Image (tube, rainbow, N blue to C red):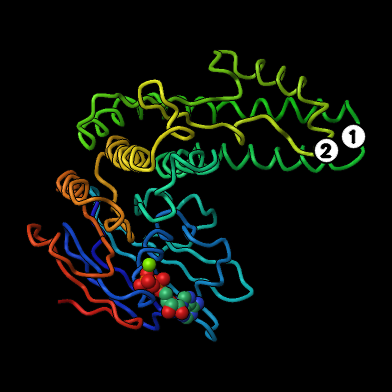
Amino acid sequence: MYLNKLQLWNFRSYENLELLFPDGISILYGENGQGKTNVVEAIYLLCTGRSHRTNREHDMIMLDRPWTRVRAENLQKDGKHTVDMVMARGQKKRILVNGLAISRISEILGQLSGVIFSPEDLDLVKEGPQKRRRFMDIELSQVSKNYFYALNEYNKVLEQRNSLLKETVNTSSLEVWDQMLATKAVPIIKARRDFCSRLEPKARENHKYLSSGKEELFCFYKDCAQGKENIEETLLEALYKSRETDIKRAFTTIGPHKDDIVIKLGETDLRYFGSQGQQRTATLALKLTELDLMHEDLGEYPVLLLDDVLSELDERRQQMLLEKIKGVQTIITVAQKTDHFKNINANYFEVQKGKVFKR
Ligand SMILES: Nc1ncnc2c1ncn2[C@@H]1O[C@H](COP(=O)(O)OP(=O)(O)O)[C@@H](O)[C@H]1O
Ligand SMILES: [Mg+2]
């Protein structure tokens, strides 16, 4: 896949921008606050339908403007695709895929595919489970609409069950929701188990490459059905057992919305006992694996977005990363154009106050 054109109108600091990206590596450089992340955000928005840095959609509309429009043109194995999104204040966003209006946000998935690696991802291993669940959910949703639907369905039931728990609880109606929740959890747990079993060997290989260490990386899905085959019954039983706690806390304390990926280096659980360096190396290995898995699922590489993370890696890892992404269209943002890039054949863009200049 190759993103060749991005157009923005009234998008954050850009009044009007048309950017033609070459294949290969593009480096956007410029001082802080000039608009580098805004470009990355717009691309990712068209990949997933959502911003990676805000849930408040209207923040993306340029101040004092009534609407914003973001459009991308990309080339895939099967030809040219366009995605177009319009967000106006006080209205639902509108999306056109290949010129046709779509009614379900899910239809945007698979049109433009991307993997992002930004400063918020650097603590993927260290932070709470929510980040790791998101890691799985975003990747799985981009390659499978069924997963996206299943997750939405599950979340709807979860919300209902939680709101019931906040009221005076009637046990028999809770039973109905328990059953629904357990049923809806099955495809999610299965897909995530499968994802993690594919993730592990590749992440281990990538980790070996990045660390040249002796210790091996392990990662597995720690799920609420304890890895058992009969997911539905196991979860139902667990929900029954946690019923009192759930009522007391007015919240569903067990289910795939609480699951995690455990990441170990040898015997060491990296989240709790890893050094920052070990955690970062594992994170980078996992992100590279995300790229590999998407490549496997889509039959082509997604666009890789590296927002401000290169400077967070030591020089050796930077070189290894750049080596590894040969053949992947990559958009990199950096504050300074440094010597690190002197050996790579890249295209440069300078970002200055909401304008981008090809250098
Ligand atoms: N809705 C908006 N309208 C106008 N300007 C915005 C909006 N949102 C963000 N900005 C501006 O965008 C700039 C930040 O851009 P960003 O891409 O994060 O910079 P960086 O180059 O550091 O990545 C800031 O100057 C900010 O004022
Ligand atoms: Mg930035």
Front-lying residue, 76 or 313: 313
State the separation of the CA atoms marked 1 and 2.
6 Å
Query: SS class of the residue under badge 2?
Result: helix
Q: Which mark is residue 229?
A: none
Q: Position of residue 115 (x, y in %)?
A: 34, 49
Q: Is residue 173 left or right of residue 178?
A: right
Front-lying residue, 328 or 254: 254
Q: Quadrant of residue 235?
A: top right
Q: Is residue 58 left or right of residue 234?
A: left
Q: Residue furthest top?
A: 229
Q: Residues within 10 Å of mark 2 (few under 14, many from 20)?
A: many
Q: Ligand 1 closer than 8 Å to the CB at disc 1? A: no
Look at 33% across and 27% down and name the residue there: 217
**Residues at marks 1 and 2 touching, judged by CB atoms closer than 8 Å:** yes
Q: Ligand 1 closer than 8 Å to the CB at disc 2? A: no
Q: Position of residue 280 (x, y in %)?
A: 35, 43
Q: Quadrant of residue 282?
A: top left
Front-lying residue, 206 or 304: 206
Q: Position of residue 157 (x, y in %)?
A: 70, 38
Q: Badge 1 is on which residue? A: 169
- Amino acid type at circle 2 is Leu
Q: Is residue 134 above or below residue 21?
A: above
Q: Is residue 86 above or below residue 248?
A: below
Q: Badge 2 is on which residue? A: 165
Query: SS class of the residue under badge 1?
Result: loop
Image quadrant occupied by the C terminus:
bottom left
Q: Residues within 10 Å of mark 1 (few under 14, many from 20)?
A: few
Q: Position of residue 149 (x, y in %)?
A: 55, 41
